[in-house]
Amino acid sequence: MENAIRDHAYFLSFCIEQYKEAKGLTGKETMQVLAKYGVLQYLEACFDVLHTQSRQWLIEEMDEYIENQKRKEVPC
């Protein structure tokens, strides 16, 4: 169980850092964006599939998830 927790923590840390670098954000800005749209919860919930993907694919997936969440905020 401890290994699984550690693996998830490493994966989330990797995603945060890679997203920060790809977008040219500060750590604080990155966490604000990821928290606002629930990205870390999504990454955690889908760990089994997502942790096998490439850096670029993960960043694109995070961008797509954020865009989908933004669309949910706009009332029709």
Image (cartoon, helix red, strand yellow):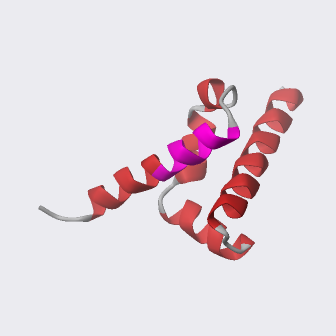
Q: Nearer the viewer, residue 22 or 7?
A: 22
Instruction: Tell me residue 30's x, y (percent).
Output: 64, 67
Residue 51 highlighted magenta (yes or no)? no
Q: Nearer the viewer, residue 30 or 73?
A: 30
Query: In the figure, 39 relative to 51: above or below?
Result: below
Query: In the figure, 17 relative to 60: above or below?
Result: below
Residue depicted at 45% across the width and 48% down the height: 65
The reply, left or right, for residue 24 in relation to residue 75 is right
Instruction: Tell me residue 2's x, y (percent).
Output: 88, 31
Instruction: Tell me residue 12's x, y (percent).
Output: 72, 46
Report the number of numbered marks.
0
Quadrant of the rendering where the N terminus is positioned:
top right
Query: Magenta stretch?
Result: 55-63
Residue depicted at 73% across the width and 71% down the height: 27
The reply, left or right, for residue 5 in relation to residue 45 is right
Residue depicted at 55% across the width and 66% down the height: 33
Quadrant of the rendering where the C terminus is positioned:
bottom left
Query: In the figure, 26 relative to 18: above or below?
Result: below
Instruction: Tell me residue 58's x, y (percent).
Output: 61, 41
Residue sitting farthest toward the left: 76
Classify residue 16 by image quadrant. Answer: bottom right
Q: Main secondary structure of the magenta part?
A: helix
Residue depicted at 69% across the width and 41% down the height: 55
